[in-house]
Amino acid sequence: MVDDLISPSRIEPGYLLDERAMLEGWLEFHRETLFLKCDGLEDDARKSRPIGSSKLSLHGLVRHVAEVERNWFSRVLASDPSVPFIWFDPSREDSELEPLDNAVWSDDLFAWRSECDTSRRIASARSLDDTGKRRGQPCSLRWVYTHMIEEYARHNGHADLIRELIDGSVGC
C-alpha cells in the first residue's frame, strides 16, 4: 500500500520551491530515508552484510555518509583540509564500512547526525554560488548539494536492498 511508504519524519519537497529550498529539501529527504532504512533493527541486523560479495551494511552506510558529509561541507566547502577523518583510514579502502565489531550504533548515529548539523550550519552561511576548493578547483555549494543528493540516493538504493534481504521490509 502506498501509504505504508510515507513517514511523517520524511517530507518530500514541494513542487514549486526555489532552487535552494528544493536542493535542501531533497537532501533532507534522502538523509531521513537512510535513517528510516536503519530504524527498528537490532545492532546485529544493522551490521550484517547480506550480500556476500559486498562490504555494505546499513551501519556501515551511516558511517560512510558521515565521512562524506564531513568531506564535502567541512573540508571542501569550508576549505578546511585539516578536519580529521572520523573512521576512514586513507591507507585502507572503504575502512569506514568495516570492521564494525566494536562499533556502537548510538555513537555512530550521533556522529552522523552531528555531521549533518555541521553541514547545515556551513551551508547556511553561503550562497549557492559560493565556492570551496576540491583538488585545487573551485566547487560551488550548488554542486555540493547536487552531489550529496546523488550520493544519498545511490546509497539509499543499496539500503533498500540490504533492508529487504535482512527482514523483507520494502519502502519507507
Image (cartoon, rainbow, N blue to C red):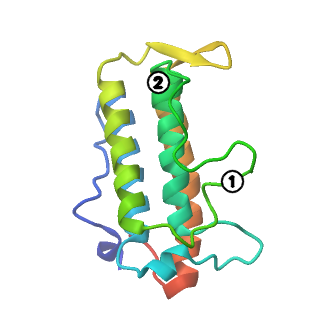
**Total numbered labels placed on residues in the image:** 2
Pointer 2: residues within 10 angstroms few (<14), some, or many (20+)?
A: some
**165 relative to 116, above or below:** below
* 99 relative to 122, above or below: below
Question: Residue at 47% across / 40% down in the picture?
Answer: 69
Residue identifier under label 2: 142
Residue 169 found in image quarter:
bottom left
Q: Position of residue 29 (x, y in %)?
A: 36, 51
Please name the residue shown 31% across and 51% down the image: 12
The answer to whether any part of residue 22 appears in the image is: no
Q: Is residue 135 visible?
A: yes
Question: Between 91 and 112, which is closer to the camera in this rendering?
Answer: 91
How far across and down, in percent of the image, does residue 152 sit?
51, 50
As drawn, the residue found furthest toward the front would be: 102
Which numbered disc, 1 or 2, marks the residue closer to the eye? 1
Q: Which residue is mark 1?
A: 94
Residue type pointed to by label 2: Arg
